[in-house]
Image (spheres, helix red, strand yellow):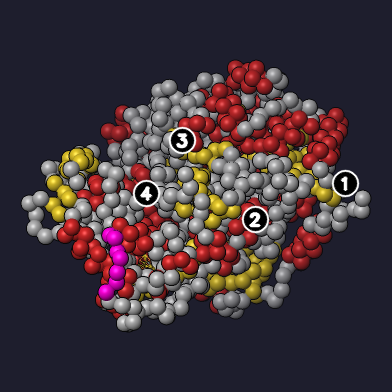
Amino acid sequence: MGYEPQADFGTPESRSDESVSLTVDGREVTVPVGTSVMRAAREAGGDIPSLCATDSVKSFGSCRMCLVEIEGRRGTPASCTTPAEAGMVVRTQTPRLAKLRRGVMELYISDHPLDCLTCSANNICELQDTAAEVGLRDVRYGYEGANHFAKSPDLSNPYFLFAPDKCIVCSRCVRACDEVQGTLALAVDGRGFASKISAGQASDSFLSSECVSCGACVQTCPTSALMEKSVKQLGKPERSVVTTCAYCGVGCAFRAEMKGEQLVRMVPWKDGKANRGHSCVKGRFAWGYANHRDRITSPMIRENIDQPWREVSWDEAMRFAADRIAAIKAEHGPRALGGITSSRCTNEETFLVQKLVRAGFGTNNVDTCARVCHSPTGYGLSTTFGTSAGTQDFDSAEQTDVFLVIGANPTDAHPVFGSRIKKRLRQGAKMIVVDPRRIDLVKSPHIEAAHHLALQPGTNVAVLTALAHVVVTEGLADEDFVRTRCDWDEYQDWARFVADERHSPEFLETVTRVPAATLREAARLFATGGNGAIYYGLGVTEHSQGSSTVMAIANLAMATGNIGRPGVGVNPLRGQNNVQGACDMGSFPHELSGYRHISQGDSRKLFEDDWGVALDPEPGLRIPNMLDAAVDGSFKAIYIQGEDILQSDPDTHHVAAGLAAMDCVIVHDLFLNETANYAHVFLPGSSFLEKEGTFTNAERRIQPVRRVMEPANGPIGQGLEDWQVTQLLANAIGCDWNYTHASEILAEIARLTPTFAGVTWDRVIAGEQLQWPVTDAAPQGSPVMHVGGFVRGKGKFVVTEYVPTDEKTGPRFPLLLTTGRILSQYNVGAQTRRTANSTWHPEDVLEIHPTDAENRGLADGDMARLASRAGETTLRVKVTDRVAPGVVYTTFHHPDTQANVVTTDNSDWATNCPEYKVTAVQVTPSNGPSEWQESYAEQARRSRRIAAEPAE
Amino acid sequence: MSGTLAKLQRMADQIALNFTAIGKDNAVLATADHIAKFWDPRMKAAIFASDLSILSPIARSAVENLRAGHEPPPQTGATEFNAVDEVGHSDAG
Ligand code: SF4
Ligand code: SF4
Ligand code: SF4
Ligand code: FES
């Protein structure tokens, strides 16, 4: 078999429903209207030589290599720019064409260094392939003339290089950057022979340009002009395996291109519907952490957290853990035990951790990091729609006319989807951004939002209610939709509520700081501009009124009739790769997989019969409650898989106190993370390249995760996937589990979870694009939800009163801090910090408005002390008007900054999701790390010690 | 313990406050329903045993009802969970 690049059909697929038939070299071909002659020929199994065409971008027609003859037409048209028409008779291989093509090829080759044998693209080069196809035997022009050979390569990007001497100026890279990524970083400078590709200004290198290192240009380059450095170093891959990115909730499908167990490169898989062949810098390039020297490869234990770690066998680690768990259970009962499942891990692994807690420990104290990000989505959307999953697939954005993006920054946090939004905007769709900060979607090359509502942090509900006020009082509501699809009485109650004068934009302007006129125009645009789609992120959920904001969003979508068809909908943008899956798998303390409450006798019985144990009928503790209970002494042991709660959860001091109070903290991770400073048992984990299973992305799409290399946590042949480690722990405490492959766990999930009924491992790895529910009624899954009716009958309007947060500014803490993410780093940064991605974001910085900075005597690049009621830290200042006066902004990717030292224990009223997005703070000049940072660094250093191997 | 108790009291009041808009009687039911479905037994026990007079009136009635064993039927879409064999619904975070 060996390695084959993915097929390139030359021009993008046409999604037309109508088709045409034509004849290509005597063969009948039927293709959708709008397909090029080139694509028709290739779909029919033939080939036409080409250089400037590729199926990720529109055809350009510059290389003249793809000429064909068409009966009844004069000349030799370019097949990449000629649409297939009914009855066409096309000839792709004739002596005349061969001669023309050879002539073109000779010109290209005369300016191309012929060092093929040592070129990094040797054997994966389209120029070579094309030369072979046209039968090039001789170059008449000689190589002595002017050429581009001597130009030195641009090596500035850590992941790929640009070698100008290998460039054939096909402009595929420029078009990919424009059309696919939407960054417009590249240009063709000059004309004719003098033309060359450059990043931004002529003097710019890739690294100093606008380039975001998405890799689209590299993927599309036919030669080695743009090439992954890893290919240059390792050579051509020998096989490829389709798998799924383990970073964000977009869930991009990739081909892991391998050489033995060595990953050579990750290339986006064009048949994955989440990304359709695109990627971002994280999934495409930031996978080096899997082999980082910080990986812990042996289990470790210690009596208490002041001691150094001791490396032990799996057996000894499990015995140690099991003994502690048994002792705690005997003394304090099962409710003193608990666990946290990971949104980074597979569905199968998550399912097993909650099974271990419920069936093995005998308690429902299991929670997941979704608690701290999207739990309000669960609450809010199930209240209004009856189900809280996002209502659309990503393709839906192609039919959206007005985007309303609230508290999300897709170009940084969900980059591939961000690119799809930008593409749609360039086609003319409108954008409304509701965010305290001027994110890139407000203004970037060729894109400008129609409205930016730069609200005061913490006033989401007020803004949404004001938008609803305008919709209702100006008669813009879609009452026909509401009458047929929603509860009309509830709608009227709600409409009366929002129509009240105290919800008008004018009245609320002092609270929200959004000019009333702007807000009114935004409301009118959303209600009347065609298909309106709402996308939102953690800027909605991570507030004391997170759940209310989600309900207010749902109200607005229903009132404007924007639910239940492509192009519209309410779409939470999930943070981590498998947040959706972790929730589906029963990670919350009150419910079993498939969203069935633990108090329901028949639901419990289903699991009790299958598992052969009795389950506790009472809901368990959520993460913040676990920490409270630990400080109180009633919660003693925790098993944490793939989460770093010390860094990611708010109010670090409280998290640390809770962890320190426990007798048995088991951390299961790739690295000694911050939480592990408080752990007694460390179980080394496996990366997404080292295990099998499934992830579920933000569209509910269930995708494969494939093992392409041995888990690093054991000697050759003895490495363990994460679910195997959980199984060892379960068996050590007396369970009798015998799974031999993740597919057996998936089968158990399908058996016990109605939405997964039709999901099997075989279907997933065959590349079927399954979006749950996958049932008898919807055997192929369900891309759009609530078509024709809400899952639970009528949509419910819920009155949402704006309740200001308790977190208020005052003389001591006059600024509001809000937090977010950046493109190159991911969450707590455990992975991305261990890759060259740190080139772009080596530290967390504090964005502050020029006026606020000047008042404090701070200049760009100064160190500042950031203090709140909860704690303080220091970090570098970036002076920018992206944030409004009175607002400061930072990220939480770096443990040295520990931005969560300053966030408070305020939380969403319904779900306890922490209020990360609003903290009253003061910023002052500083000349060194805070006391906490210093003592923390020392404590972290001490607790990471590993004892030297004892002499045998 | 006191720190945790203060948090529980604040949570109960916060829940009650966000239900206020649906009217007092409904808000009492919804608050009780919410606590019953999402709080663990020790959290419930702690608030039952505390001085309820410092709670807001809605939170207080809700906790009193629960303490007396009156758990209301589901009051919102968020507390109507899937039946054992039902498809749909989701709490996904
Ligand atoms: S760098 Fe590659 S894709 Fe870009 S113009 Fe040159 S050959 Fe074409
Ligand atoms: S890596 Fe992406 S952003 Fe950078 S130049 Fe290439 S296509 Fe443009
Ligand atoms: S991080 Fe997200 S957008 Fe980037 S490649 Fe991975 S799944 Fe795609
Ligand atoms: S491939 Fe058609 S002109 Fe270049």
Q: CA distance from mark 4 to mark 3?
A: 17 Å
In terms of secondary structure, where does tag 1 sit?
Answer: loop
Residue A677 seen in this snapshot: yes
A18 on left or right of A761? left
Q: Which residue is mark 2?
A: A291
Above-or-below relation of B49 to A920: above
User: Residue A340's spot in the image, x, y percent?
Assistant: 67, 40
Q: Residues within 10 Å of mark 1 (few under 14, many from 20)?
A: some
The quadrant holding residue A773 is top left
Amino acid type indicated by mark 4 = Ala
Q: Can residue A135 be found in the magenta stretch? A: yes
Which segment did they paint magenta?
A134-140
The quadrant holding residue A509 is bottom left
In terms of secondary structure, where does tag 2 sit?
Answer: helix
Report the number of discs.
4
Residue A553 seen in this snapshot: no
What residue sits 63% from the left and 53% below the top?
A: A290
